[in-house]
């Protein structure tokens, strides 16, 4: 597997783990193949989960709450935010990866929501 594919897989693995966390299923998610950096990201997310939620909630409209947001979109946003905070990867790159994940794994227009939220919190 080339470097780009490895980097992409690492990014997708993080957001899949966040999805499991948000679904209360993270204990069944196998992280044994995660590298040290991925472990740091998930540790950061576990430690700061409520703070991240509190950062995002005020950015949502009164009619569209955090609770109504799709779990997959939450996972993409939280995973990208945690990855950026731990790794320091450039904002544009993190958001671009998150947009691609939203286009691949969520609804047609979810990428716009993911982009808007990440642009404000990163």
Image (cartoon, helix red, strand yellow):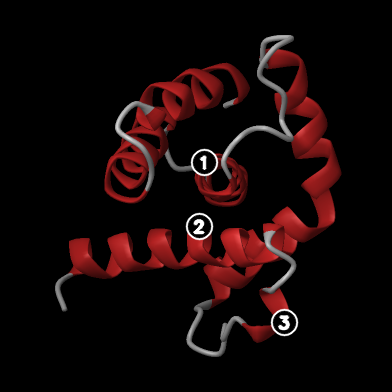
Q: Is residue 112 left or right of residue 16?
A: left
Residues 21 and 109: in front is 109
* Image disc number at residue 30: none
For disc 2, the neighbor class at 10 Å (few under 14, some 14 to 19, many from 20) is: many
The residue to which callout 3 is attached is: 27
Alpha carbon separation for disc pair 1 and 3: 21 Å
- How many numbered discs? 3
For disc 1, the neighbor class at 10 Å (few under 14, some 14 to 19, many from 20) is: many
The residue to which callout 2 is attached is: 15
Q: Secondary structure at mark 2?
A: helix
The residue to which callout 1 is attached is: 73
Q: Is residue 53 left or right of residue 2?
A: right
For disc 3, the neighbor class at 10 Å (few under 14, some 14 to 19, many from 20) is: few
Going from N to C along the chain, the mark reached first, 1 or 3, is 3
Going from N to C along the chain, the mark reached first, 2 or 1, is 2
| Quarter of the image with the C terminus in it | top right
Q: Secondary structure at mark 1?
A: helix
Above or below — where is 76 with respect to 13?
A: above
Alpha carbon separation for disc pair 2 and 3: 15 Å
Location of residue 93 by image quarter = top left
Residues 51 and 101: in front is 101
Q: Secondary structure at mark 3?
A: helix
Residues 32 and 62: in front is 62
Are the two marked residues, 2 and 1, in contact with CB atoms closer than 8 angstroms?
A: no
| Quarter of the image with the N terminus in it | bottom left
């Amino acid at each position: 597997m080339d470097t780009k594919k490895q980097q992409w897989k690492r990014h997708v693995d993080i957001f899949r783990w966040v999805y499991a966390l948000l679904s209360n299923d993270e204990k069944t998610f196998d992280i044994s193949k995660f590298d040290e950096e991925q472990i740091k990201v998930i540790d950061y997310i576990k430690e700061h989960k409520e703070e991240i939620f509190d950062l995002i909630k005020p950015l949502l409209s009164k009619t569209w709450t955090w609770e109504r947001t799709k779990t997959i979109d939450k996972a993409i946003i939280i995973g990208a935010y945690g990855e950026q905070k731990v790794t320091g990867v450039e904002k544009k790159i993190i958001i671009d990866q998150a947009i691609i994940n939203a286009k691949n794994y969520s609804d047609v227009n979810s990428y716009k929501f993911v982009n808007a939220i990440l642009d404000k919190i990163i």
